Amino acid sequence: MNDMTQVIAEPVTWRVADIEAIFALPFNDLIFRAQTVHRAHFDANTVQLSTLMSIKTGGCSEDCGYCPQAARYDTGVENQGLLDIETVLEAARAAKAAGATRFCMGAAWRGPKQRDLEPVLDMVREVKAMGLEACATLGMLKDGQAEQLKDAGLDYYNHNLDTSPEFYGEIITTRDYQDRLDTLDRVRGADLHVCCGGIVGMGESRTQRAGLIAQLANLTPQPESVPINMLVQVEGTPLQDTEAMDPLEFVRTIAVARIVLSQSYVRLSAGRTKMSEAIQALCFLAGANSIFYGEKLLTTGNPEVERDRALLAKLGIVPQGAACH
Ligand code: SAM
Ligand code: DTB
Ligand code: SF4
């Protein structure tokens, strides 16, 4: 036992200070620790691939300062009502053919109304029937909606905490942190898998990054999937000119998430088009074991499928479920 073991011994409740201490480890110690935790729980050379699709785009009533889909910011995103089911299923079939195992449907809603939810339930049923896992991110859920999604066969619901409680008010004012925690409770209460993470590079401090990770780590049970997004700076949003984050600090964030969320899939999410292959490789070394796969996220770009295939091949990382394709 050395001092480092002492610092990262798993407490019942993670304090922000515990997490800051992990952040502050020498880089090599941090990565070694993250790899050790990763290898205790996962095959270190496997990655899970999810493909995203925006099923309802833009015109959103919320004021999330990072988001190109908020109606109040002039970002050039074209509004698109809920897509018809066949368009969505065609994209899901293509995602499966390209090797994704999960299809995630995103909607620019504050939350779905019942009349919005019903067609989405049909999409979930059909995506499942294709043999894909189904995920949705539709905003805040009201009582009973998570159960309807579960009954339709949904596997995962994505709802992010986005940042620490202390920084949150600088980014979003139209709903509060507790609203997000309440939706996460509803998702968990319906026995859905929870996909919950956040965004870094929004001008938050390291303490605030640790604050986000503490919130995620203290969810009980911890989320099965934790997307860590690097802010995509979109012109027209309040965060368009935020100072870019040091990529090595991003790698540290992934490593810390891996250590404290030891059994969660940590997803290297938005922001990959701006990352070199070397930084992405470091993120995998730090314990990231899932990515968004396909040339588009919701409204912004993601690396081309061929580029991702080449990168994974170069690293000897095999997509989960690849043997079936
Ligand atoms: N409207 C729903 C909601 O907000 O819950 C679902 C879709 S919303 C676009 C899903 C997530 O995308 C957000 O919670 C945020 O974490 C992420 N996101 C949105 N814009 C982003 C950006 N510019 N950079 C990085 N992540 C972003
Ligand atoms: C998540 O954490 N990141 C994804 C997914 N969950 C829905 C969305 C990223 C969106 C990036 C900006 C865009 O493409 O509009
Ligand atoms: Fe709307 Fe979701 Fe964008 Fe916020 S993140 S503005 S809720 S689409």
Image (cartoon, helix red, strand yellow):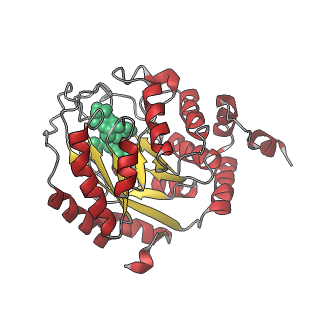
- The picture places residue 309, in percent across and down from the top left corner, at 37, 69
- Quadrant of the picture in which ligand 3 is shown: top left
Work out whether residue 212 or residue 304 is closer to the camera in this orientation and state it: 212
- The picture places residue 229, in percent across and down from the top left corner, at 42, 43
Residue that appears at 29% across and 30% down = 240
Instruction: Indicate the quadrant where residue 88 lies.
Output: bottom left
- The picture places residue 196, in percent across and down from the top left corner, at 47, 43
Work out whether residue 46 or residue 325 is closer to the camera in this orientation and state it: 325
Residue that appears at 30% across and 60% down = 125
The quadrant of the picture occupied by the C terminus is bottom left
Work out whether residue 185 or residue 246 is closer to the camera in this orientation and state it: 185
Does the rendering let one see residue 282? yes
Count the numbered circles shown: 0
Residue 302, above or below 203: below
Work out whether residue 107 or residue 202 is closer to the camera in this orientation and state it: 107
Residue 211, above or below 166: below
Residue that appears at 68% across and 54% down = 32
* Left or right: 117 in relation to 244: left
Does the rendering let one see residue 232? no
Instruction: Indicate the quadrant where residue 260 lies.
Output: top right
* Left or right: 176 in relation to 123: right
Q: Which residue is situated farthest in the right direction here?
A: 1
